[in-house]
Amino acid sequence: GDSVTQMEGPVTLSEEAFLTINCTYTATGYPSLFWYVQYPGEGLQLLLKATKADDKGSNKGFEATYRKETTSFHLEKGSVQVSDSAVYFCALNLAYSGAGSYQLTFGKGTKLSVIP
Amino acid sequence: DGGITQSPKYLFRKEGQNVTLSCEQNLNHDAMYWYRQDPGQGLRLIYYSQIVNDFQKGDIAEGYSVSREKKESFPLTVTSAQKNPTAFYLCASSISGGQGETQYFGPGTRLLVL
């Protein structure tokens, strides 16, 4: 079945460091890809998404490019801030033939801590 | 402000008891979802509904039940058959349940067993 693998955490960075969180997926078709962020004790918020190959999603300085050839959607940010400390989830969304359902399949999450 | 509300924030369940988690949205979305989050496990889909009076089982539906009598509401009941209910429960909605749609999440309910 469809699956998402993202790098294990926790990741600890100093403020203004470069961030990469790796995400790769397995899917039988052409999924849409998402990054969600979860701050402590809260629900998830969409960070960015891409719906087709070579699309780049971006928001709040974060970027990710949908790479079909490597089945990847790595999250990057050039200069992290303390306020970026959160758990980041990669997810994919794909219709199953005949089922009409569009489920989100999530990775296990990567916890990021940014220290001043 | 449009959004999704979940209540209560914390819920305690005694052994053998059924408990119901509330989820309400005022986004006029047709599709609604329930997820369970365990530490280090990511989110897993319990149930989803794409239209009023219809819902489908997700990956871990055993021990849970739902109803969808109104577009705005999608309550989740954790039954006594769910032997390990301690988790963080998240409700979400999207416009129609189509591929590529953003799902909007509520703040979550943390369920603890006494």
Image: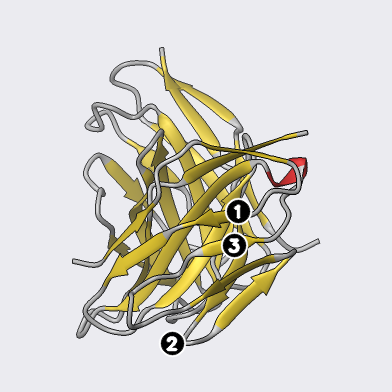
Is residue B40 toward the left or the right of residue A65 in the image?
left
In the figure, A55 relative to B105: above or below? below
Q: Position of residue A36 (x, y in %)?
A: 55, 58
Question: Which amino acid, mark 2?
Answer: Ala
Q: Quadrant of the C terminus of chain B?
A: top left
Is residue A21 toward the left or the right of residue A13 in the image?
left
The residues tagged by marks 1 and 2 sit, at their Cα atoms, a distance apart of 22 Å
In the figure, A84 relative to B97: above or below? above
Question: Which amino acid, mark 3?
Answer: Glu
**Residue at the spot of label 3:** A76
Chain of the residue on which disc 2 is drawn: A
Give the secondary structure at mark 1: strand
**Residue at the spot of label 2:** A53
The residues tagged by marks 3 and 1 sit, at their Cα atoms, a distance apart of 5 Å
Identify which residue is drawn at 51% across, 31% down.
B110
Give the secondary structure at mark 2: loop
Q: Nearer the viewer, mark 3 or mark 2?
A: 3
In the figure, residue B10 lies in which quadrant?
A: top right
* Residue B73 visible in the snapshot: no
Identify which residue is drawn at 38% across, 27% down.
B86
* Circle number at residue A19: 1
Identify which residue is drawn at 48% across, 65% down.
A74
In the image shown, does B42 or A26 lie closer to the viewer?
A26
Name the N-terminal-most of marks 1 and 2.
1
Question: Which amino acid, mark 1?
Answer: Leu
Chain of the residue on which disc 1 is drawn: A
Q: Quadrant of the N terminus of chain B?
A: bottom right
